[in-house]
Image (cartoon, grey):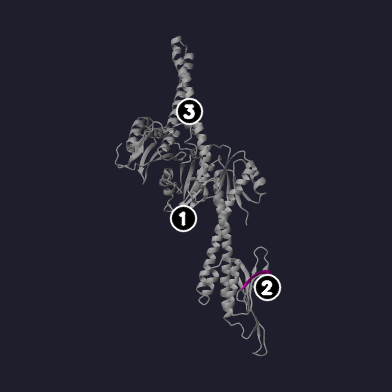
Amino acid sequence: MAKETILIVDDDIRNIEFLRDSLLIPSGYRALSAADGEAALDLALKEEPDLILLDLQMPKMDGFDVLEALHREGREIPTILITAHGSESVAIQAFRLGVRDYFPKPFKVTEIMGAVERSLAEVRLRREKQELTERVENINRQLEQKLKELTILYGVSKSVTSLLDPDKLLTRIVEATMYVTGAEEISLFLLDEETQELQLRAVQGVGEHEARPVRRSADNAVVRQVMSTGQVAMIQTARTRKTDPLQATLAVPLRARSGTIGVLHATNKMAMEPFSENDPYLLSVLADYAAIAIENARLFAEVEEQRTKLETILTGSEDLIIVTDDDGLVLLLNPAAANAFCLEKVEMVGKPLLEVASNEALDQLFRLPGTGNGVRNLEVPLVDGRTFYASLSPVTDVGWALIMRDITHLKELDRMKSDFVATITHDLRSPLTAIQGSLRLLPQLGQLNDEQADFAKRAMRNVEHMDDLISSLLDIGRIEAGLEMEMSAIHMDLVIEEAVSNLMGHAKSKGLVLRAIVLDDLPLVTGNHMRLTQVMTNLLDNAIRYTPQGGSVTVRATAEADHVTVSVIDTGVGIPAKAKARIFDKFYRVEGPQAEESPGMGLGLATVKSIVEKHGGQVWVQSKVEEGSTFCFTLPRLEASGQGA
């Protein structure tokens, strides 16, 4: 097997040299390297490595951009993400993009090499399976061609090719050859795959009703000649009188794709008639069938071995793995999936997944719009209290592959963080109120000079800023807790109209064009009017804030089969590629002069994400620097569309 190729991508040459020279090359791998995202993408597309060790923060393109670019190109290369800036959100984003493993720097050598071997094991298995499939297909094509020529041997060949047990197959071939040729003795020699030694494997002599399996070394000059030349050999001794018995030998090669794998040998020691001119043809045809049958038996054994390996991998995986056809009928699942849904495998295979699993979030996942490559992602809670990150991917000519990873511990960490923030904000509210009251009382205690008044004003502004921050955090806490989230039928066009009207003056003051393009018959959605207005206001305010004079901000709303999509499109400064992965994180603000000029706490987009997800929707951003940004979110359509707002 050729050396497997691993692409190392890191902007630190020391990391590249360590991974390449100290770990990968000594382990027998071929190592490539790139110091930035663009070079990595070019190398990945050109060399098609078996595995990528990818840094996250890099010049030109970050690790997530490289992964997304590879997905767009249809290259599914196993990737291990290595980063010095790890977080729960980075880990979730990484696994959403199909990353096999994730390591924060510094990492342990044993862990990284273990991850490399696990990832490459899957690559090897897939490659071996593909090679075996190609070999089986090629041999079957040969078999179909030979079937056209085997009218005389049809019955014999049918019984031969139906066997997959090696010993039974070899003895059946010998018996069929005895039947076809009428020879006194038939022997079958095979080349041992491991030792490359020629062995006698089956024999049938005069008076024997059945062939018998054997296994011993062979030393026959004619057989060695046929093995060497790959040509039919027919030798008959001369006789002085026609009444003298004739000794004759007919040997034909068993040819396979890899070459001659054995010899079918027929002998007459006391025959009165020589082998006919047609006997070499009949024996060659039977030998061809025998070779194909032997190869099929070997390939079946190899495929069965690979199937067992795959079954072992599926059985050992803690992730839930389910494969369905295009109609949602379960084709395959691993024990972890069956256990998670409290069902036996036999109860699920062949039945509709959404019926036997009976999970509302799973049903929603199948109805979600797919991304560019058709992948759909959603968090799916189970009745046992665990939460899984589910990824639903289309599989060509099969249907759908559903992989669910347990993120309960990550959700618990996020909950603990939110509880901590909520506690701190509550505890800060009282002292801030006291400080604010004291600052208001200062002028009543005596005349302040200019410097003292300036200090007091600055202190008041900082207190008000902190009060706004606490209010925003408490608001997000209420959203995440589902408070103040009464749902009803909502006319999304009215929500958009209200938000646009409220911010029209702000847009005009900056010299911007603000417009809305909404379908006349936009379907109703299920939602909370106040919160959805908050979403539109935050997105529009964000777009206006980062769009320079003379630009435009456009709101579009479209209807799909089961959801409504709203887009806010601006011609602003855009978002750097490396910032897009964190744009919806709490307190995150894009660095740059535009951000410094625009006040904010980095909670507006985090609030948008929380509200949209509480409504059962998704939110994402597409952006190019200096060209603008498009923020999109989806909301489920109201099933009973006759209800009013």
Mark 3 or mark 2, earlier in chain: 2
Does 636 appear in magenta? no
601 w.r.t. 131: above or below: above
Identify the element where label 3 is drawn: helix
Closer to the camera: disc 3 or disc 2? 3
Q: Residues within 10 Å of mark 1 (few under 14, many from 20)?
A: few
**Identity, as a three-letter code, of the amino acid under mark 2:** Arg
Rate crowding at label 3 as few (under 14), some (14 to 19) or many (20 or more) other CA atoms within 10 Å.
some
Q: Earlier in the sequence, mark 3 or mark 1?
A: 1
Q: Is residue 549 above or below residue 156?
A: above
Q: Which residue is mark 1?
A: 398
Give the label on residue 422, or none.
3
Is 162 situated left or right of 28 in this image? left
Q: Residue 256 is drawn in which quadrant?
A: bottom right
User: Which residue position is annotated with label 2?
Assistant: 224
Q: Nearer the viewer, residue 109 or 21?
A: 109
Cα distance between the residues tagged 3 and 2: 85 Å
Left-right relation of 70 to 244: left
Residue 629 is labelled as: none
Q: Quadrant of residue 556?
A: top left
Mark 2 secondary-structure assignment: helix
Q: Quadrant of residue 472?
A: top left
222 part of magenta stretch:
yes
Magenta range is 211-223
- Whether residue 15 can be seen here: yes
* Element on which disc 1 rests: loop
Say few, some or many: other residues with alpha carbon within 10 Å of mark 2 (under 14 / 14 to 19 / 20 or more): some
Of all residues shown, which one is farthest toward the top? 446
Residue 368 shows in this picture: no
Q: Tell which of 290 and 40 is nearer to you.
A: 290
Q: Is residue 361 left or right of residue 117?
A: left
